[in-house]
Image: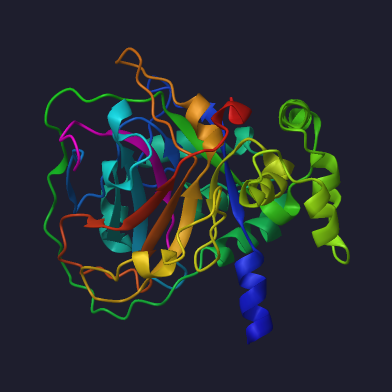
Amino acid sequence: MAAEQRQFIECVLLGTRDAEIDSKRNTSSCFTSKIGELPNCFPSVTLRYPSCSICNGILVHVVQVYCPLEGSPYHRTVNVFACPSRECFGKSESWTVLRSQCLETEATQAQQPKANKEAAMATRDWCEGADDWGIDEETESSAPPANSSMETDFTSQLQGLNLREQTQSSVPAGEGLLLPGPVPTFQPYYISVVDEGEFCVDADMDHAQRLLKEYQRREGVDVQQLISCDGEGESEKYEKTKARHGDEIFLKFMKKISVCQEQVLRYSRKGQPLFITAPPSNVKQMVPCCRSCGSPRIFEFQIMPALVSMLKSINTDGLTVEFGTVLIYTCEKSCWSPSNQTPLEEFLFVQTDPDQKFFK
């Protein structure tokens, strides 16, 4: 049992920015993982657009992650919002994370087959050899079978607890997304997914290697030697390659993401977060239990610093959000009542970036 748990924790899915979402050619839905744009709602959900708890300003939608759990009768989406005010940068209270769910039967009735088919066809062209958090099973079955085993592996990793709630024959329709007026919006992109264990360095990683060399020159640290640290003697090598600012946590972070510098998400439900700076000693106690059912919250995914430079406004000059990494914790049971019509707020923890320039 212990060995199986360790194996699960070590499995991580990486999300990278894919093609731009062109509303004239295809549309996103609540079954799409994406950067920017407005959030999508399940047909039974009413999502009132959130505001900043610090300055009361309008938030901007950062990412939407479609992440259903194995064995659950629900579709499941997590939306993350942030305050674009510089006075609020780096403060967890200026961010909001909302989890929405919908019974598969209700979602099926509201789907638009044509839009889903076009989006699915485009996604297969973008991310060959990778899965995507936005493709339904019917669409996937028409794809070439070459990557079927990998897709099965991805599905099995998005694993959760079975929900044993009694489903109802009818669920009242929600009002959808309720906006307070014009809201700032980032340019939308699809998010494609690759298993970290299957990721291979290719020509696209030349840029990441240049960034590593630049960091090495600026900080006086041998990054390549750090990356090669493995097994016996690792601690000694690590000490020799310590950066001038002495942040060992940051160096571990750099080592871990070096295989895919472009990652904007790291998904590992029930796994371990990757801290960019030393977390508070009481970080586990900082994560509150679920407000809805009282169950513990567990780590699910985190937003990575590479996303900062990819966030481009489509309707507001100077729109930006700065952070190091944003850790998302959700209800262990992923509790949800079939009659629920509003998203449930989850917990997040923001860490600032000790060297944001490295990721630009």
Q: Is residue 196 visible?
A: yes
Identify which residue, 327 or 80, lies in the foreground. Answer: 327
Query: Which residue is at the far bottom?
Result: 1
Q: Is residue 118 magenta?
A: no
The image quarter in which residue 287 lies: bottom left
Q: How many marks?
A: 0
The image quarter in which residue 84 lies: top left
Above/below status of 186 relative to 178:
above
At horizontal 62% and vertical 71% (from top left) the residue drawn is: 8
* Spot occupied by residue 334 in the image (x, y as percentages of width and height): 34, 68
Query: Which residue is at the far top?
Result: 317
Q: Is residue 59 magenta?
A: yes
At horizontal 82% and vertical 39% (from top left) the residue drawn is: 222
* Spot occupied by residue 73 in the image (x, y as percentages of width and height): 35, 69
Q: Is 244 situated left or right of 90 in this image?
A: right
Q: Is 357 situated left or right of 146 in this image?
A: left
Q: Is residue 121 visible?
A: no
Above/below status of 100 relative to 191:
below
* Spot occupied by residue 139 in the image (x, y as percentages of width and height): 51, 48
**Which quadrant does the C terminus fall into?**
top right
In the rendered structure, which segment of residues is drawn in magenta?
53-68
At horizontal 46% and vertical 60% (from top left) the residue drawn is: 300
At horizontal 15% and vertical 33% (from top left) the residue drawn is: 179
Identify which residue, 239 or 149, lies in the foreground. Answer: 239
Above/below status of 202 relative to 253:
above
Identify which residue, 26 or 45, lies in the foreground. Answer: 45
